[in-house]
């Protein structure tokens, strides 16, 4: 074969090899034994505070007002506040950098005190946040707080509550999800935790229902599995219906 022809063929082979390499898929995965660095979250910081899982408020209506009873049962072991953070994270965690904020137990207890005619709950909540939150601060804070529920007897329960009147036991979960500015703690939004169910007027309902005696505290002042599982279900049900309203907060 003439040398000129050999040179031409060799040139064609080199060009084909270059084209093949250029068109081959590129694999950018890590080498063996290496891991991919996690993607840095660039979402805004949103602090989460849940203050509803410390007690169940119990109200028993007696034959006369002097026989009424009101007391609270500790329920820290139920980990209700953990449940709240987990549920909010599952909805908002992909859009924001969520940070759980732990506060001293009883930080919001002043809001559960009796009749205070000159009090301003909104300002008191801001003062509490300014006290318990340290720098660096988040852009926003979602604070899950108890709501007062007044009973027909004049008694009240805050947050997770049990009441007994006549022969009826009733359980409820009254709380709200409040969104605060991270710098001055101005209240930006307030969403009462409600279920997806509606009454005949078309209004969504507070989670609660008539229950049986197995929910009531025992003689030694403790609550059993029926109350624990029931209240956890109330909280989850209302969070599933309410947290999506915070998606743009």
Image (tube, rainbow, N blue to C red):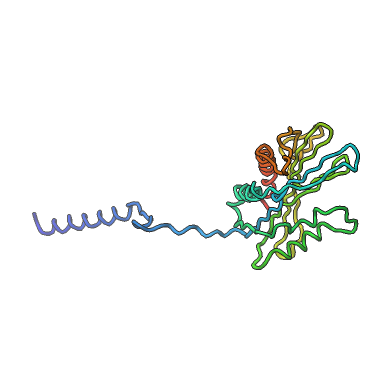
Q: Residue at x 90, y 42 (%)?
A: 65
Q: Which of the pair 64/30 is nearer the observer?
A: 64
Is 48 situated left or right of 61 in this image? Answer: left
Residue visible at 66% across and 50% down in the picture? 76
Left or right: where 98 falls relative to 125: left
Judge left or right: residue 47 versus residue 4. right
Q: Is residue 200 above or below residue 240?
A: above
Q: Return the x and y of residue 215 as percentages of the image width and height.
A: 72, 37
Asked whether 151 or 186 is in front, the reply is 151
Q: Nearer the viewer, residue 93 or 167?
A: 167
Residue at x 69%, y 42% (from the top left corner): 223
Q: Is residue 84 above or below residue 219?
A: below
Of the pair 124 and 53, the residue shown nearer to us: 53
Image location of residue 19, percent across then percent down: 29, 54
The residue positioned farthest toward the left in the image shown: 1
Q: Position of residue 206 (x, y in %)?
A: 76, 40
Outermost residue, bottom direction?
135
- For the image, the number of numbered tags is 0
Which quarter shows the N terminus? bottom left
Residue 102 image position (x, y, % from top left): 65, 59
Q: Quadrant of residue 242?
A: top right
């Amino acid at each position: 074969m003439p040398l000129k022809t050999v040179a031409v063929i060799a040139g064609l082979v080199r060009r084909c090899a270059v084209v093949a390499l250029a068109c081959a898929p590129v694999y950018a995965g890590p080498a063996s034994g290496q891991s991919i660095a996690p993607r840095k979250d660039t979402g805004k910081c949103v602090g989460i505070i849940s203050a509803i899982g410390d007690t169940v408020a119990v109200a028993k209506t007696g034959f006369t007002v002097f026989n009424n009873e009101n007391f609270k049962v500790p329920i820290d072991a139920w980990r209700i506040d953990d449940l709240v953070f987990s549920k909010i994270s599952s909805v908002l965690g992909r859009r924001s950098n969520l940070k759980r904020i732990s506060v001293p137990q009883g930080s919001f207890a002043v809001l559960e005190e009796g009749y205070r005619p000159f009090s301003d709950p909104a300002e008191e909540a801001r003062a509490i946040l300014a006290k318990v939150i340290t720098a660096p601060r988040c852009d926003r804070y979602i604070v899950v707080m108890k709501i007062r529920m007044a009973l027909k007897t004049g008694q009240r329960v805050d947050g997770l509550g049990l009441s007994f009147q006549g022969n009826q036991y009733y359980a409820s979960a009254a709380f709200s999800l409040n969104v605060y500015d991270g710098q001055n703690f101005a209240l930006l939004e307030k969403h009462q935790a409600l279920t997806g169910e509606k009454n005949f007027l078309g209004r969504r309902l507070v989670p609660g229902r008539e229950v049986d005696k197995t929910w009531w505290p025992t003689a030694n002042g403790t609550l059993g599995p029926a109350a624990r599982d029931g209240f956890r279900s109330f909280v989850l049900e209302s969070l599933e219906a309410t947290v999506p309203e915070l998606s743009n907060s």
